[in-house]
Amino acid sequence: MAKKRPTTKTPTTKPKAPQLVGGEIPVVGAREPCPCDSGRRYKACHGREAAHAATELVRRPFEGLPAECDWVALRELVPAATVELRLRDALPQGVPEVRLATVLPMAWPALRRDTGAVLLGLQNDTASGDISRDLADTLVRALAAEPGTPVDGQRPAADGPRLQDLLDPAAPFEPVVHTGFEFWLENAEGATGEVAASLERANAAAIPTVRLTGVDAAYWCEAPEKNHLRWVMSHPEEALLDALARLHTAGASSLGEGTRLVGSFRAHGLVVPVWDLAMGMGADEVEKPAAEFGERLAETLGSAKPLTAEERRARSGFTNRQITLS
């Protein structure tokens, strides 16, 4: 006897169309019923839009903030630094100040000190494709946290505020680069036991770094084999690569004897040229040649001439070695 083919019943009723409740759909677990009463799981209903909004990559998350280039540098290049942040609105009662920090102990996204002050960590994994929205969400929760507690990371609402909404656009952004992570503690000199040992380990792993004063967002660092200068630039990428190729071909891309422009990388939508420096060449010695290079670059960026064959080869060499960090 032939076996009967399994049949699938056709539903007699269709799932309800999604209905808004109170004007918006709250976020729930992926496998929970969608709050819109559609009869489907959240991940297959309104969770799709939320997931897409949370994972869509924002190419330049710090665009529009004062000192965008320094934001990128502190996120990707600088081990230990802090910056005082000023909000558009007055600080809540009991919060004397807010500071951005490159990294916090235990990789906490934020920390509300016993004094009520807030430290916001920059070098953390983020839950969405928009670092600015993640940081803003963490900052809002840190302002309301109990003093003396760290703040965990979480996925922000897709329509939540960004840093550009919270920070005062007229406030200065002045990074203070530290030799170590003593800023983690309000009394680092009094640290003992495991706290002191943890601080010592973190300090030992930090690469000595100095921010140049004569140009914007250029950071000298002392590596084991040779020193480097890494300079975050906001010029349009294509024009900048053309200018670097022109200068390199003309023998004008170095920062003096024993230095060499070795390439660049891309971070958060900006290009970061990198120079190898002579061993022992300190940050003070780089100041003048960096300022002079900045002048040459500004002049070269204005050229509209087509690249020569040699300049195209130089440009191709830069782009072939370029990597993207974000």
Image (cartoon, grey):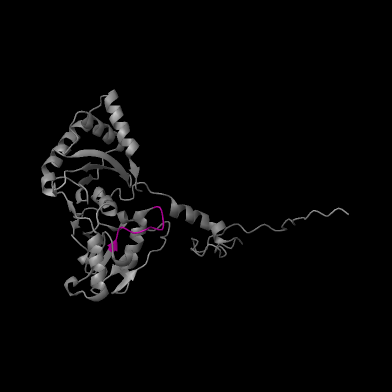
190 vs 282: above or below = below
Left or right of 103 on screen, residue 220? left
54 vs 301: above or below = below
Dividing the image into 4 quarters, which one contains the N terminus?
A: bottom right
Residue in view at x 26 percent, y 67 percent: 118
List the single residue furthest toward the right.
1
Q: Which of 223 and 249 is in front in this view?
A: 223
Q: Where is residue 127 in the image (x, y as percent from the top left)?
A: 41, 58
Q: Nearer the viewer, residue 17 or 104?
A: 104
Q: Is the magenta stretch mostly helix, strand or loop?
A: loop
Magenta range: 120-129
Q: Magenta stretch: residue 124 in it?
A: yes
Left or right of 140 on screen, residue 17? right
Q: Which of 137 and 316 is in front in this view?
A: 316
Q: Position of residue 119 (x, y in %)?
A: 26, 65
Residue in view at x 16 percent, y 34 percent: 296
Quadrant of res 215: top left
201 vs 240: above or below = below
Q: Can residue 94 be seen in this view?
A: no
Counting the numbered discs, the total is 0
Q: Position of residue 36 (x, y in %)?
A: 56, 62
Quadrant of res 120: bottom left
Q: Magenta stretch: residue 325 in it?
A: no
Residue in view at x 22 percent, y 55 percent: 207
Q: Can residue 96 be seen in this view?
A: yes
Residue in view at x 47 percent, y 52 percent: 52
Q: Where is residue 235 in the image (x, y as percent from the top left)?
A: 26, 39
List the single residue furthest toward the front.
225
